[in-house]
Image (spheres, grey):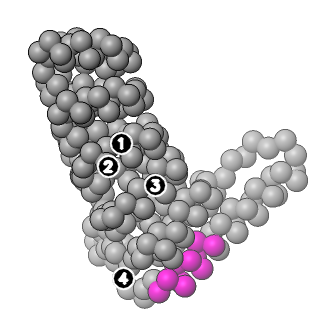
Amino acid sequence: PKRITPLMLASTHGHYDVVAYLLDNGAKVNRTDAFKKSALIHAVTNGHIKIASYLLSKGADFNGADSSKNTPLHYACAYGSEEMIDLLMQAGAEVNSVNSWNITPIVTALMKNHYGCLMKLTNYAGIDVNCQDDNGATLVANCIVKFEQSSYEFAKLLIEQRNASPNICDFRGNNCMHILAAIDVETKFEYQYNSYTEYTEARKSLKQRYIAFFNLLIDSGVEINEPNTVM
């Protein structure tokens, strides 16, 4: 059983008046379901900003995590809600909270390709742009692995405007240049194109992106002679 309360259901389905009525009549705002998800997490997941705001005004725990230690801010980032991010941050949410996989909200946003959320989070004081996931990979390293134009642009912002370091190594001793050097561009290439011109332009674009990543790392002072620690 999921152990869902009426308040959680109303929060999930966007029934604001029902949420208000339940809380006025003794519903427990921080009660959680079988996965330790609160009514606030259910509201955030489903994009109900008005309900989330009301729950917070009634004492909802803005840092209350589920069974995998995902906070409401993790969910806001996972579902790409910039407005929800602002609401939770204004309430006092911990911007660098980590879940069971050592993933912070900003890494969650990157994994889900929500670049608007990424840009918003980097503007908050205290954001750790050098955070590492459960493999020790940083935001910049994860941008390289994604190898998209948007991830390149975000890596560029992190390094040039937020002082992110390309030299922080993962748990195998790989810095960002190790990561880039291991990238197989062919695996990033889509072969379904309507014409040979599209095909050649796509290959050219991938090569240019690789060079752009390379130059970004070199210009930022990445260490290129340091061996990793892989056994």
Instruction: Report which residue position mark 3 lands on.
Output: 120
Can see residue 4? no
> Quick one: label 4, few (<14), some, or many (20+) residues within 10 Å?
few
Which numbered tag is attached to residue 227? 4
Amino acid type, mark 2: Met
Q: Secondary structure at mark 4?
A: loop
Rendered view: 155 above or below 117 = below
Residue 49 magenta: no
N-term mark: 4 or 3: 3
Amino acid type, mark 3: Lys
For the point 69% across and 67% down, the residue is 207
Q: Which residues are magenta?
A: 212-221
> Quick one: label 3, few (<14), some, or many (20+) residues within 10 Å?
some
In the rendering, at what x and y percent does residue 3 appear? 17, 15
Residue 229's image quarter?
A: bottom left
Instruction: Report which residue position mark 2 lands on.
Output: 89
For the point 87% across and 51% down, the residue is 196
In the rendering, at what x and y percent does residue 105 appear? 34, 50
In the rendering, at what x and y percent does residue 20 appear? 26, 17
The N terminus is located in which quarter? top left
Amino acid type, mark 1: Leu
Which numbered tag is attached to residue 87? 1
> Quick one: label 2, few (<14), some, or many (20+) residues within 10 Å?
some
Viewed as shown, does residue 202 lie left or right of 185? Answer: right
